[in-house]
Image (spheres, helix red, strand yellow):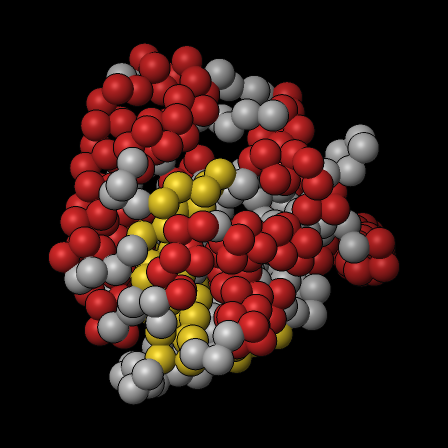
Amino acid sequence: MKKVLRIIAGFLIFLLIFFLAGEAVCRVFVLSNDTFPVDFIEDPFLPYRYKPGSRTVSLHGIPININSLGLRDKECDQRKGEKAYRILVLGDSSTLGYGIRIEETFSERIEEILIRTDTASYEIINAGVSGYNTRDELNYLVHYGLDLHPDMVIMGLMTNDFTVRSLELDIKNGIGIGSGSNLRLSPAVKKILRRSKLYVFLAWARVEIRHRYKKRDFTKAEKTSDLGELWTSYSKVVDRLVSVCADNKMPLFIIAIPSREEVLRGEYDKQEFIEKMRLKARDRYVFIDMLPVFSNSRGPNNADNLYVKRDSCQPAPKGHKLIAEEIILNTEFQRYIRRV
């Protein structure tokens, strides 16, 4: 019996040393991607919202402050300044600024440039939420965004937004757990684990291995489930978004943001959808495609300078800077700004 206990004790000590060593290696060499450890709250119109007033720090030391409106932005009054021109920015994690500081996001850069170069008063509100798609962003605008009285709406768009299905999360103690998750850990355990760089690295590696060695032909899979039907459904969401903006006299700008792989490949995963969005724009909204800009600014062998480390969907500060500059230089954007 004592021998068995010694074996068990030795094995537990080995596991402890292994995990401590692994954690140390991951922290020294920054092997994991960053995290966004913000508490979620349930919402009647959206998959979730960020808990107002939350303050935390990401795994890589990025401060994350959620204001009283439940947005990752500086504090702002729901009432607009008397002579202010307010721009509401919708989007997912690429708009939110996942993995970078809030002042490095394209929404903050736009506000900084406008304030520096113009005598008018501008307020840019970053309403990006990680995991949202176009349908969620429309619902946010209808139920919350209009109460902020924006004069213009900018929406960041990635190809994973071409869906009409929202995330389904079971929210407990501020943690969102996917309905299809294989690992049903308690919220308390998950809060501890998401502070571990080894845990985050192993989760990232698992996804990468599945992506590389169990490749699926997503295009073919989508076509078999009727890609045309998907576009029809998604197009209705865009039509509704355009209608809401038009009814409230808010010009709409849609910014297509590519992933690292799309930049390297030179085309989007759903290139046909991007083309449809471009054609659909006409005089209904302004469509800005960032793929050519990112492609011209990438490194000679990769696009690592444009994206945060180990996350191909999150633009780095340089990527956000390019987005801000492209919006600012857009002739239609300038036309609306000159009216202020």
Labels in figure, total: 0
Question: Where's residue 159, x and y in %?
Answer: 44, 35
Tell me what residue is drawn at x 24 percent, y 34 percent: 235
Q: Is residue 176 in view?
A: no
Name above or below for residue 34 compared with residue 180.
Answer: below
Taking depth in this image into account, of 214 and 246 the one nearest to the observer is: 246
Taking depth in this image into account, of 200 and 190 the one nearest to the observer is: 200
Kindly indicate the quadrant of the structure image that contains residue 149.
bottom left
In the image, 174: left or right of 35?
A: left
Q: Is residue 268 in view?
A: yes
Name above or below for residue 23 compared with residue 276.
Answer: below
Name above or below for residue 316 compared with residue 191.
Answer: above
Tell me what residue is drawn at x 70 percent, y 64 percent: 60
Tell me what residue is drawn at x 25 percent, y 60 percent: 250
Taking depth in this image into account, of 141 and 226 the one nearest to the observer is: 141
Residue that protrudes farthest toward the left in the picture: 247
Question: Where's residue 93, x and y in %?
Answer: 49, 54
In the image, 20: left or right of 327?
A: right
Question: Where's residue 108, x and y in %?
Answer: 54, 68
Tell me what residue is drawn at x 32 percent, y 62 percent: 152
On the rendered image, what quadrant is the C terminus found in?
Answer: bottom left
Name above or below for residue 86 compared with residue 255.
Answer: below
Question: Where's residue 98, x and y in %?
Answer: 56, 58
Taking depth in this image into account, of 29 and 156 the one nearest to the observer is: 156
